[in-house]
Every structure is written in structure tokens, then in C-alpha cells.
Amino acid sequence: MYLRQAWQDKRLEFEPINNKIRKIRLGEDSWNKLWVPDTFFRNEKGANFHTVTVKNRLLTLNASGFLWYVTKISATLSCPMKLQKYPLDTQHCPMMFESFGYTMDTMYFSWLPSPVDIDPNVQLPQFTLKDEILYDCSQNYTAGSTS
């Protein structure tokens, strides 16, 4: 899957170059110099970043200081199944995002318009992916509220 995240850092605003260039792709050397969200999947059983033939990630910056981060990930997520009506059942498998080290007062996740693209060529044997349901699954922990 491609995980896309966006945020604004006003310190990185710039004047468009020659009134034309309004977006810059940042190189690999930028990754260690910029803040990037510490997102993880709360219900992850295992995950990997794709790195063949290079790290499959992209970071772009626009003139307003908005950063767009895209990375390719393979993830195995836990999915609690209710099989009482099998084989006529419907399952709901969550994909829950969370910040590892920031509370909601510092960092909050929200969905952009039309945030999920499903490739029609991807098929799962014996399963049909019907739709996506987006909701806020923020949690309160002893250390603080996370999103």
C-alpha cells in the first residue's frame, strides 16, 4: 500500500521560483533534517518498507510550507473476525493509525477528502473488498490522548 501523509510547517514556506516552481521534491539528504510524523499501525502484526531498488518514499514541499510524504509499505494487520454466519458473513478489518510519541494536543490525524484509492486489479482469493469506512479512533492512554 502507499501511505500518504501531509502537514504544514510554516518555517519552510518559500517564494515560488521564477513565479513557476511552486513545488520541490526533497532529496534523501532532507529526511534527517526535517520532522516527519512517527505514524504506526496500532493493530500491526508485521510491516516492512519497500526498498528495492531504492527506498520507495517521496517527500515534496510546496510554497505554502505543506509537505507531502508518500511511502510504500507492506503490512499484516490483525483483523478480529466474526464467523457465526460463515460463509455468508461480512467482515470489517480495521487499519488504525496512531502517533508513537505525540499526544493529540501536539499532533492530530484527520482524513483528507477521498483518502482511499482501491486498485481494481488487486484481488484477494475468497474475499471481496466492498468499501472503506473512515472514522476517528482516537484513544486516551495514561500517558495522554493519541490520535
Image (cartoon, helix red, strand yellow):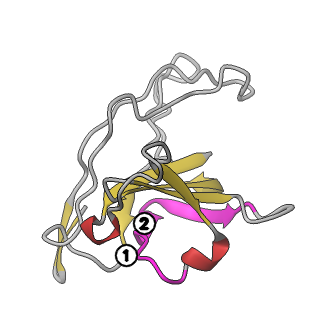
Label 1 belongs to which residue?
A: 100
Give yes or no for contact between labels 1 and 2 (Cβ–Cβ under 8 Å): yes
Q: Quadrant of the N terminus?
A: top right
Is residue 42 highlighted in magenta? Answer: yes
Residue at image point 46% right, 33% down: 116
Q: Is residue 66 above or below residue 135?
A: below
Q: Is residue 127 visible?
A: yes
Is 56 located above or below residue 130 in the figure?
Answer: below
Residue 111 in percent (x, y) is at: 31, 42
Tell whether 74 sits left or right of 64: right
- At label 2, the amino acid type is Thr
State which tag comes first along the sequence, 1 or 2.
Answer: 2
Q: Is residue 121 above or below residue 13?
A: above
Residue 62 pos. (x, y %): 41, 52
Read off the residue under disc 2. Answer: 39
Q: Residue furthest right?
A: 53
| Image: magenta residue range | 32-50
| Residue occupying the point 13% across, 70% down | 105
| 43 inside magenta stretch | yes
| Point 42% across, 66% down: residue | 39
